[in-house]
Amino acid sequence: MAFDRAVVTGGAGFLGSHVCAELVRRGTRVVCVDDFRTSTPDNLRELLDDPAFELRPDDVSEPFDVPGDVGLVLHLACPASPADYLRAPVQTMRSGGFGTLHALELALRKQSRFVVASTSEVYGDPLEHPQTESYWGNVNPIGPRSVYDEAKRFGEALTAAFHREHAARTGIVRIFNTYGPRMRSGDGRMIPTFFRQALAGEDLTVHGDGSQTRSLCYVDDLVRGLLAMAESEHTGPVNLGNPEEVTVLDVATRVIEVTGSRSRIRHVAPMTDDPQRRCPDIGLAQRLLGWHPEISLHDGLRAMAGSPLLVS
């Protein structure tokens, strides 16, 4: 299924900017809606003069509209890094709640396909491993991370409600840790933090003993999966991520190696409610979408080390 025109909320962010670029490359006209709270127009500089691309500064937590026909609404807008959502907890919940509502209402008015970018954080600190889509999660509803976790869980519930009540053509993807170009060096997430520290010759700060695990998917792979979901009629939820599980300590060591840094690793206090294990079961994505990640962690980290990838 090809889309003539798509709306991407949060399209100036790390993931959103890659989605916008790939849609334009595929021949889709794109309207990017973003308020730049946690993003920058610089991420879109290669698209700004393209007649197939339109940038609309707007806050999706308030009602918004896009004139004309729309075949696809991709709702990506929401602070995604701990530094951002801990600094602006209420706005994070507004983006995940009201923002999802307004994006769904736009899709319903336009009778378009709607896909919401949910997150592996809906699983919390999981008691099931690896995590399947049928797992309901283990989330602390009042902890500091809950503003992001619960906003995304509410967004999923709202999306499912629109599908049941209005027969909206909705889909839910649960995105696991993703990395690549245009991550903000100071956004607090593990990969950009490690690269910033390694390139500056600083100690790489590992929270706790570093035995907690993550599953890291390179952004090009993730975008392929997201658009495969959009082009399908599946409702989801569908996990998108790399099932190669690695420890945080291993990631830190690999970043030092690929950057050639002389940095050392320094252990600091564990983060509150930090998940101890995180790994997707992607069997559903493989069966329904024919999707699996192709870029290894080794190759992805080398690509980051060899490019001016981090933005301020």
Image: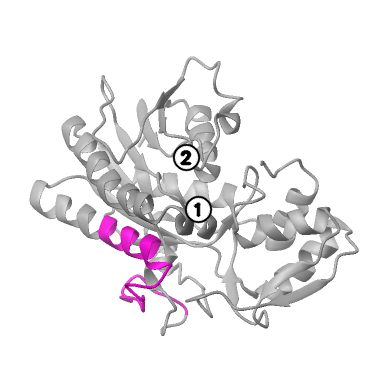
Q: Which amino acid is tagged 2?
A: Arg
- For marks 1 and 2 on the same chain, the one whose residue lies earlier in the sequence: 2
Would you name the residue on which mark 1 appears?
Answer: 84
Residue found at x 35% / y 37%: 1
Horizontal and vertical percent for residue 29?
A: 41, 23
> Could you tell me which quadrant the C terminus lies in?
top right
Residue found at x 56% / y 74%: 271
In the figure, residue 205 lies in which quadrant? bottom right
Please state if 209 lies on the left or on the right of 165 as rendered: right
Instruction: Kindly give the residue lying farthest to the left in the view shown.
Output: 165
Q: Specify start and end residues of the magenta stretch as a single range.
A: 130-156
**Inter-mark Cα distance, 1 to 2:** 9 Å
Dot 1 alpha-carbon crowd within 10 angstroms: few under 14, some 14 to 19, many 20 or more: many
In the figure, residue 157 lies in which quadrant? bottom left
Above or below for 217 versus 142: above
Above or below for 112 versus 163: above
Please state if 119 lies on the left or on the right of 195 as rendered: left
Element marked by disc 1? helix
Q: Is residue 146 magenta?
A: yes
Horizontal and vertical percent for residue 67?
A: 26, 20
Q: How many marks?
A: 2
Residue 291, disc? none
Dot 2 alpha-carbon crowd within 10 angstroms: few under 14, some 14 to 19, many 20 or more: some
- Residue 34 in view (yes/no): yes
Q: How is the image coloured?
A: one colour
In the figure, residue 269 lies in which quadrant? bottom right
> Closer to the camera, 90 or 20?
90
Horizontal and vertical percent for residue 144?
A: 42, 68
Element marked by disc 2? loop
Q: Which amino acid is tagged 1?
A: Asp
Would you name the residue on which mark 2 appears?
Answer: 37
Cβ atoms at labels 1 and 2 below 8 Å apart: yes
